[in-house]
Amino acid sequence: MTEARFMEGLVQEEGLIFERSREGKRAFSLPEPDVPVRGLSEIVPGDLLREEIEDFPEVSEVDVVRHFTRLSTWNYGIDTGYYPLGSCTMKYNPKVNEDMSRLPGFAHSHPYQGDELSQGALRVMFELAEFLAEIGGMAKVSLAPAAGAHGELTGTAIIRAFHAKNGNPRSKIIVPDSAHGTNPASTSRCGYEPIEIRSNEHGCADAHAVAALMTDDVAGIMLTNPNTLGIFEENLREIAEIVHAKGGLVYCDGANLNAVMGIARFGDMGVDVMHFNLHKTFSTPHGGGGPGCGPVGVVEKLAPFLPLPTIERDPDGFHLNYNLPDSIGQIISFYGNFGVMVKAYSWIRSLGPEGIKAVTENAVINANYIRQRLKKHYHLPYDRLCKHECVFSDAKQLPNGVNTMDIAKRLIDYGMHPPTNYFPLIVHDAIMVEPTESEDKASIDRFIDAMIAIANEAQTTPDLVKSAPHKTKLSRLDEVQAARRPVLRWKPGE
Ligand SMILES: *Cc1c(COP(=O)(O)O)cnc(C)c1O
């Protein structure tokens, strides 16, 4: 029972709302209405009405408010602190961009409003697509996909449509082992067989390996750049030539564009299709299941296959174009997640070309600073200049019985969110750190100091690390059990 649990200082412990239930408690008390009362069943169709909910909690208003307010303080987010989750770009985004997306003219516009009443919104989308095309070196961009993986699916469908139009969709796509996990998944979902190539000793896709596999049956290659090791795919141009020579296409996963934008463009390296993650690089927070946007950019010859609708400009203004005979079709309701687009537009406009470039420079220097200072303390499998993130492992701590999970949990005691663990798969027991551009040196130094302290603890007091976290309400949870046997319904007495 909640009352029996202790509060510690002002950090409140919190049970389930069901445990607060007392028979007869009500969350509101209004005077008797002086107008006729209509029952719920008169308003809501019967088949949508639920029967009595078993064990529905009976609680007061203050119970409800305290319960949910306390729970909300248990969240850890980028506004709370440092969040070096590799491959996720958990960076701070200026609040002004949120403000812009909430301007009433944007927030209240309706997708059925018609082009003539949506000129402002269409202009934002049109110009955003142009900015992204410029940043990626692409001919045309569609903003429709709702996520990075959705962008990959869209881009692969475009590749398939292109090959099919030329008489043979082909059956395979090459995917390096350093590509993001969604890459092979998206290619298979589109009916292609992903064929894996192993990275070379520098952590890069190898041009010879591609050449050996590239046949007339291979639709192309899908690679992630920078790859999941945080390393720039330096053979990309050469690989693109090999793939193109056999009629294949090159897809580049640009989810981690905060490592290259403003400095280099994939279009200039022979890439035919790419996607962007607006909910990473372009001012929408990543994670939390919120709406995302994974625009897809293509070269000129693939533009006819883009999803519907495209946004066009003519002398009368902007309009949605549904007349694209070779299009892969509509991939989302309406035009995608507009609020995310406004934030990206606002962010790009406020930074300008110099600011975009500075973002990349800061993201890269931050990651390299960490790499350089931590490599004495943690095994660094690919010790070379990285882009926006770097990947360590637990190899130096394992002899003392301390593994990646222990290190991650211990970092929580130091007040920080752990890095990504056990990904990418090509590094055994990976610890993947992405500081992002929004952290200053003081906060990065705090992280490095904590990591060094943990490395020392792993030698002197390994049990302390292995049993971490110690400063959280709950210590180590059984994650396997939580995933395999989730208890989603509370029953009294259980
Ligand atoms: C995050 C990420 C994705 C997937 O993006 P979602 O929006 O989560 O679907 C794909 N590729 C790379 C390289 C990523 O970092």
Image (tube, rainbow, N blue to C red):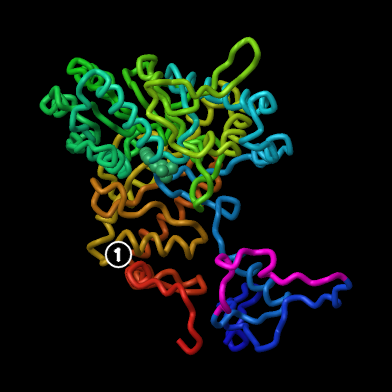
Q: Is residue 38 magenta?
A: yes
Camera sees residue 351:
yes
Q: Residue 72 at x, y = what percent?
A: 61, 64
Quadrant location of the C terminus? bottom left
Which residue is rendered at x = 28% and y = 41% of the image? 189
Q: Residue furthest left?
A: 212
The answer to whether residue 161 is above or below residue 200 is: above
> What is the magenta segment's predominant secondary structure?
loop
Q: Residue 438 at x, y = what percent?
A: 55, 40
| Quadrant in the rendering for residue 344 | top right
Q: Is residue 112 magenta?
A: no
Residue at the spot of label 1: 402
Q: Residue 190 at x, y = what percent?
A: 28, 37
| Quadrant in the rendering for residue 167 | top left
In this image, 105 relative to 299: left or right? right
Q: Quadrant of ligand 1?
A: top left
**Magenta stretch in the rendered image:** 35-53
Q: Secondary structure at mark 1?
A: loop
Q: Nearer the viewer, residue 404 or 96?
A: 96
